[in-house]
Image (tube, grey):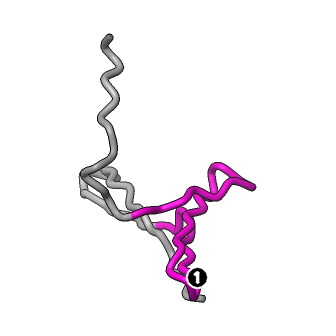
Amino acid sequence: MQIFDVFTKKEYEKEGEQKVISYKAGALKVTDRGNMYLRLFHIPNTDFYVRERNSDLPTVNLEE
């Protein structure tokens, strides 16, 4: 299994100077079978399944 850290950044201004802070937002796990799971720390106890984009999937139009 491989585990990757997921980072994000926040840009802000302090005393007239532009600052950037990055922090760990979650983890991406890749199993030996190739399955991928994403865990975001702000949504605990929930794994999201990550799949390669497939053009055969239907498009959902929410405006109908």
Give how far across and how far down residue 35 sits, in percent: 54, 74
56 left or right of 21? Answer: left
Query: Dot 1, crowdedness within 10 Å: few (<14), some or many (≥20)?
Result: few
Q: Residue 57 appears at what percent x and percent y?
A: 33, 45
Q: Nearer the viewer, residue 6 or 2?
A: 2
Q: Is residue 1 above or below residue 45?
A: below
Looking at the image, which residue is at 60% across and 88% down? Answer: 1
Question: Callout 1, which amino acid?
Answer: Thr
Viewport quadrant of the C terminus = top left
Q: Which residue is mark 1?
A: 31
Residue at x-position 62% and y-position 51%: 42
Q: Which residues are magenta?
A: 23-51
In the figure, 29 relative to 60: above or below?
Answer: below
Residue at image point 57% right, 76% down: 29
**Residue extending farthest front:** 56
Inspect the magenta stretch and tell me whether residue 33 lies in it.
yes
Please state which of residues 22 and 34 is positioned toward the viewer in this rendering.
34
Locate residue 40, reporting x and y percent.
Answer: 58, 58
Residue 49 among those drawn in magenta: yes
Q: For the view shown, which residue lies furthest in the right direction?
A: 45
Q: Which residue is nearer to you in this view: 52 or 58?
A: 58
**Which residue is the extreme one toward the top?**
64
Q: Secondary structure at mark 1?
A: loop
x and y percent of residue 21 in the render? 40, 64
- Residue 22 sits above or below residue 44 on the image: below
Q: Decide if residue 19 is on the left or right side of residue 30.
A: left
Number of numbered discs: 1
- Residue 13 placement, left or right of 29: left
User: Residue at 57% of width from left, 56% of height from top?
Assistant: 48
